[in-house]
Every structure is written in structure tokens, then in C-alpha cells.
Amino acid sequence: MQLKELAAPGSEITVANPNARHNLGVGIFEDCAIRFAGSVGYYAASLLDGPEVLIEGNAGWAVGDNMMSGKITVTRDAGASAGSTMRGGELFIGGNAGARAGISMKGGSLVIGGNAGFLTGFMMQKGRIIICGDAGEALGDSMYEGAIYVAGNIASLGADATVEEMTEDELIDVLTVLEARGITDKRSFTKVVSAKRFYNYDSLERLEKSAL
Amino acid sequence: MVMGSSQIWSPWIIDDIHAKAELGRYRIRGFSSFQKVTHFDDLTFLSTGLTRFPLEGYKERCNTRTVIGGLHCENPLVLETPVYISGMSYGALSANAKVALGKAAAMVGSASCTGDGGMLPGERAASDKLIYQVLPSRYGFNPHHLVDAQAIEIVVGQGAKPGTGGMLMGVKVQDDVAEMRDLPLGIDQRSPARHPDWLGPDDLAIKIEQLREATDWRLPVHVKLGACRVDDDVKLAAKAGADAIVIDSMMAGTGASAEVLLEHSGIPTVPAIVMAREALRELGLYGKVSLIASGGIRSGADAAKALALGADAVAIGIGALVALNCNKEIPESNFEEEVGVPAGYCRFCQTGKCPVGIATQDPVLMSRLDPDEGAERVANFINSMTMEMTLLTRSLGKGDVHSLEPEDLAALTIEASAMARVPLVGTNKVFGE
Amino acid sequence: MCGVSGILHKSAGFASGLSPVGEQLIRMLEPMTHRGRDSSGVTVVGEDLEGDLVVRLWTGSVREAADVLARAEETVRRAGGVVCSSHHTGQFLRLVVNFEGETSELAAALLETPGVALHSIGHTSEVIKDVGTPVAMDQRHDIGAIRGTHGIGHVRMATESRVDVNHAHPFWAYPFPDVSVVHNGQLTNYHKLRRMYEDQGHHFQTGNDSELIAVYLADKLAHGEQLDDALRSSLDDLDGTFTYLVATREGLGYAKDEWSAKPLVTMETDDVIAIASEEVALRGILPPGMEGEEIDRVEPQKSEVMTWLL
């Protein structure tokens, strides 16, 4: 709460020794810069609109949860549900991300420098996920829209996820995002999207048929 | 020669099998459970005779003001009546319906609730007190809307479909509904059953703290539970830090649910309230953590009985929609032609063909609902409920609806006695104890 | 639901001396108190005992504790054991005994002693658990003073069973000495499996679903399975959600369900393996001067099993 009071447009705030505590940097709507000099716990830099946040260490579950806009950098690993339901902005995980990264994501970019865990992109709706390392099992399970780009291996695709050819423009976009993060050694990616087989029930009751 | 008909293979069971034989999947419909279960009608009030001093039913003071939450937050939700309007999404309902409900609640000094589709600007503008839901899907979830709300409700489950997510058929996932939810146009939306960022009551405690941080510890946090394993769930919600617990029973309504869940999961409202009350008592939190009951609340009598059993407030869903004109033939409608059944029998909210403009996204149908007139009807209904409650309360010699207690009730059936834990009429016996 | 923690000193052993495992477990649990305040507990393994076995008992009445202790001593003697030392702190009873027979026989005899709940029997370990927070437990039981080689700990937010001392974790794998578990999650085939194990003669002391994991592992170990294999088969046999830790005389292990529903992070340094629900717990044991330092921690994913042996 103190952090929110300090946050003003253009201000720069450093939090020393965050000690993996939960709910640090929540609900800040100002275009300010916040630096956590160490690991943070659950829901770090969540419910944000605007700030640029640097986490010098690991993050717990749901870092960047429901971010509207802004930029978050985690220098090391992130726990489960990184970038859950995020709607805009960019979340960068320098290390590995745990299970369910980008779950129910609704926009923005989630960039993972290392590996991504089980169920990454589960029920993803919009936006993009870029994974420089390997992706765990059930990648993109039940995703609606959006795209997941994986430089490494994919353990398995989730239900209704499928591989699609990547356009040159897309590749340039992805490379540009990575280059801004200082990653230049990844040149080719597998693109995963929704197969859209679950969009509608293929059977309708009499009454529903007339409604549609 | 007809020899009678089977009670086991009734005409609707036969029809149900025919329908599934065509469909190859479970059936989906709106409205609520059709099961006949123990309900408030099975309880009766013991008004005053010679032992007590009755208050004049029409004029003497009877408080209805209701304070929800406050244990962990600065600004509890203060309502002028213990009746508020429960969460129903923009998407399931039309914009006109959402605005009418918000406005009706404001007219009676009460609250309404957003539902699984985000906060509609018109609804925010029309409402005085608006409860913002945090659902597994987080459709349209926006932290700016969160801080702009008067209370937060984390939805763990819904009485109409506990343990599963919501549903919105493609016919309603159109235009700005699809846009607000970030969904492709026309898909049959199946909301997740689990929250994306917490998976157990231990993590929920941290999630609640996050929402409090984001709202500067001002707003009450409600946790809404589908009534199933009430005792454990209520205790866990309270331990996780809820200010209020909403217990939504198997009689609760829905815009679309798998019929198998509507009919075959959850428990009725009466035992749900009693179990929740006892769970809070065990933790020493009864009267500190607020208890809200919902599911099948149809009148002031139902609401008064819910309060007597231990609820602090009730939330109404279908009741408010019926006041809006649900299942009423109006000059513009033709139920038989439009949904295939006469008014009074419609439960086709999921088709989006609502003949009265409530559960639809069709602009022509929606125009059949005037939000101002609708708001007035709903406000009238809530006022009627409040008056019914105060009338009963005064007849019991009480000047505050929150003075209602289980001892004011008797049960008309053995089942109701066991579930409500009040004596059967004509006996001193509480069955099951 | 809950918080779990575990620690193992790699270089530990009787030669290099014992480590402050009790104190470290408390330091890991304390910052996770938000995950559960109903009860707390630890198992410390590798204690240096003056006898063969340490027995931990609990009795429902503080007034009868001395009598119950006397009865328990008598039970040990009748089973052919020798009581080296015994004392009770309130309702908690601790006996160190020399016993050469089958532990299962001693356990069965103790269970039949009126007024006794059996928390653990171990050659080098004991289960200590109580209601309330870890700090309160430490104050009552002086956990911080217990040294050992490794151990596990727990804070509990009760889900589907009652809150009392006996329902607290860790659960000892009756009648296997030195095997105990702590669990975060909810098993959803508990009642069915419990009935099956009861039909086979296994004994349950509580209504806590987590006790089933202890019994499950005891059954597997009794059939000669390796710990690693037992943990792995539990991934298929247990339904619902779980991250659980197990301590044995030889080491530590964990198993994490196919849903990856319950958090876990692990950290390995030159000296220790530390595992916990949250990083904040791992940071609790960083040596002075290291508090602000970054740590390499691994977040296990789904269907994972790991064991570390001394």
C-alpha cells in the first residue's frame, strides 16, 4: 500500500530486500518505474496499468496477474500462472516459467527466456506467448485465439491446439520482441494456435437450431 | 385403452431420452432446478399472541438496514433492505436488463452485482452500490472497475452448477459481449471451473489480500459458494479472510447450465443456511462474517425465513427477472410462437430468444424491455418483499428484521424440521437431533 | 490445504555432527503461516537417542496424562521392551525405549492402551504436532532445540476433517518406524481407498485424508517397494490434488500430482536440500549475510517425484 502512495507519474521506486513476500506492487495505475532488488512472492506486479517493473530475482505464482498495460521483467524464474489473464503490456521472464503460464490470457505479450511449464497458454483467449526454451505438456490446451511461439521442443500439445505455419512478418515481430530483450540466438519457432474444433457444440436441440 | 402411466418412465423422462438420442450430449437450459425439495414453504412463523407485544404492522419502526462485511475492511456494504440483486452477466442478460437491475437496486437503497462478463458502463452509471465479481474466467476483468466497485465477490461456485464454470451459447456471444470477454464471435463459451491464479483455500487467502491491496483495504470481499460441502467450504472461506459468504443453493437460477447439474448437484437453501450458520459459529465468527443466502428466494416470507435461520441478507436472481417481465406475455411478445411454450413455462434463456428482452442480445427483442419501467417494477418488487418482511417481523414483536431467529419458526414437515433444525409444528421435537 | 516444508543436510551424519533441523523447519514454516493457522507439526529425523526407539503419544486429558504415561510404560514392558526415559509435557507423552521385537507389535499394543493416540515410533525420528501456529508450537515444544539430519514440517488449513492435535500433520506411516508424511491438497478417492486398506487390516487413527498417504506408503514399503517406486505409483493411485513430502530414516522425497495444483519449490546448495510450498520459506533458512541473495530454486511441474538420500 505504501508503494501505491509513492507511485506518481515518472517516479522511480526501489524496494530493497523484498524477501519473496506476497502482493508487492499491486494495483498501480501510474506510469512509474519500480525495481524490486530481490525475489518476490505471489501476485507481484499484478492488477497494473502502466508501470514498468523490474524484479531482480524470482517471482512466485501469478506475477503480472491481469496486467492492463506496462512492462514487467523478472530476471530469474517465475512460479505458476505467470501472466494469468493479462490483457495488455509485456511480461518477460528471464528464466523458466512454472505451470499454466499465460492462463486465460486476453492480450499483450508473455515472453519466456527459458522453459515453460505444464499447461502453458491454457484457455488463452488473445495475445501471444513466446517461449525461447522448451514447452511442457499440454501446450495451448483449449485455447481460443492468440498464438504461442516455441523455439525449443514441445512435450505435447493440449486439446484443440495445433501447429500452424508462421508468416515472415510474424517471425520479424517475434525476433524484434526478443532482440529488445537481448535474445538474438533464437531464429526459428514452432507456432501453436487453436484448431477451433471446440468453438461450438456440433449438435443442437430443436429449439436452439431455430435460434441459430 | 390407457391403463395409467409410469411414474418412473414419465412422459418427460421419455422426452429427455429422445432429446439426448438426437443430441449425443448433455442438455443445456436456463432457469432453475425443477426438483421438488424442502423449501421455505415448509416453515411457518410463530407470530405473537399473549406472550409478546406486537408492533403495528404498517407504521411502527422496523429496521431493515443491513450491514454486510466489515471484519477485515474499512467500508462495509450498507443496504437499506436485506434484499439485493445477485450476479447475472451482461451477455446472459441484455444491456437494458442490466441497467434496469442496477437502477432498481439504487432506487431501493440496495446493491446489484456484475456477473461473468465484466462491468457494463451503463450498469455502473445506473447503480449506486455495485458488487464486482471475480470469476474463474476473468472475462472483462479490469482493475479500474475493481476500485470503482462497492464490494468484491469471489465466485468459487454457483448453486445452479457447482464445481463447473459458466456457459454462454454462441447466439449470445455477439458484438460487444464477445469484445468485452475477448472471445471469438459466436462461440459456445465454456468458462473455466477453476480460477487461473489460485487453486486452493491456502492460495485464496493470498488472492484475497491482493484484492484488498488493490482497493486499499476499503471494500468487503465476499466469497460465493455453491451449496454442497457447506460446513467445510464456509469454514475455509472464513479462514481465507472473507468478510461475507454467499451460499448459493441448488434452487438458484442460471442463464445456461447443463441440466444434469441443475437437477443433480447441490443442496437446498434451508439446510445450506443452517449448516453455514453452524460452521461460522464453530469458528466463533457468526455475526462477524456476514452470511448471504441465495437460491429460490421468491418473496418477503422466504427472505424473512432465511434471516430467521441465520442469514444477514438474501440475494435474488430469477425473482428480479420475473419482476422485469420474465415469463409474462406482453403486447410485443408471442411466447408460443417465439419459444414454443406459453408464458410461465419458458426456461430457454440459453437460446437468446427471450420474448421479453431480458435474456437476449437481439436488439429487436431487447427493445421490448424499457429499462426505466423495468427498474420501477423490480424496485416495487423489492419494496414489496421488504414490506412483507417487516410485516412478519412486527407480528413477532420485533423492531428489526435482524432480530428474527430460528425460534420464531416451526416446521410443517419432518424433513423441514430436520433440515431447518426447528421443531415440527404441534411437537417440541426437532427431528434428526 | 496447507504449507509444507522439508530440509536435508547433505553432508550430515553422525561424524560431522547434527544440524539444527528443528529450528530450520520452524523458520521455514513461520513465514507460511498464512497458508494455515489451524495446526502445525514437524518430523525431525536423525536424532541421537539414548535408546532403540522414540515413541510419541498424545492423550485427551491433561489430568490423566501421568496415569496414561504409566500405562504406556507398562505396555512397553509387557511387550518385552525397556523404558530408558519417559516424560510428558501436558498431554504430549514421549518415551525412549529399548525394544528388539517387531515395531508393529509394539505399535499395536500401544494403540490398545486406553487413552492413547500414537503419533510416531522411530529409531531416529519423532513426530511433534500441535494446534496453532508454528511459533506457538515451538514455544510449547521447544522444537528449535531438536537437532538432526533432515525433517519435514507442515502448517494446516483444515479442509474436510476436524481441527485437533491428532488431525495435524505429519502423519506417521503406522507401523513403519521413521516414515512420515506432510500433505497439501485434497484426496478425492480417500474414503474408497481407506475402506479397502481397512479391509486389509491397516489401521487409521484419524479422519484426515492425508493419513491415507502414510498408510499407502507403509503398505508399499511393507511389500518391499523402494520409496521412489512407491511415490511414483501414488501418482496413479491417489485421486485429487496433492503435493506431499515424505521423510524416512534414509532421506526425503516428494510427489506432485498430475494437475500441478499445489505449489512447491526446491533449492539445492552445497550443504542442503530445501523444499517448501513457497520461496519465502526457503529464504527463511538462508545463512546470515545471505538474506538478500538470489537463490536457484526449481519449481517441480506435474506428475513429478523426487527423492534425496543421505
Image (spheres, grey):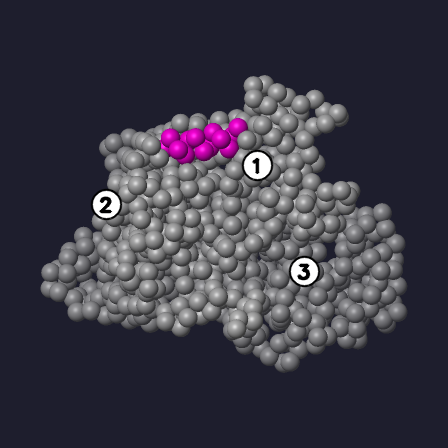
Query: Element under label 3?
Result: loop
Check the picture and name the quadrant holding the C terminus of chain C: bottom right
- Res A170 quadrant in image: bottom left
Crowdedness near tag 2: few (<14), some (14–19) or many (≥20) residues, C-alpha within 10 Å: few
Look at label 1 and name its amino acid: Ala
Q: Which label is found at residue C207?
A: 3
**Callouts 2 and 3 on one subunit:** no
Decide: is B207 above or below B389: below
Residue at the bottom extreme? Answer: C224
Mark 3 surroundings within 10 Å by alpha-carbon count, few (fewer than 14), some (14 through 19), many (20 or more): some
Return the mark for residue B364: 2
Tag 1 secondary structure: helix
Residue that numbered label 1 is attached to: B301
Labels 1 and 2 touching (C-beta < 8 A): no
Q: Chain of mark 3?
A: C
Q: Chain of mark 1?
A: B
- Disc 2 marks a residue whose amino acid type is Val
Magenta-highlighted residues: B375-387
Q: Main secondary structure of the magenta part?
A: helix
**B191 relative to B382, above or below:** below
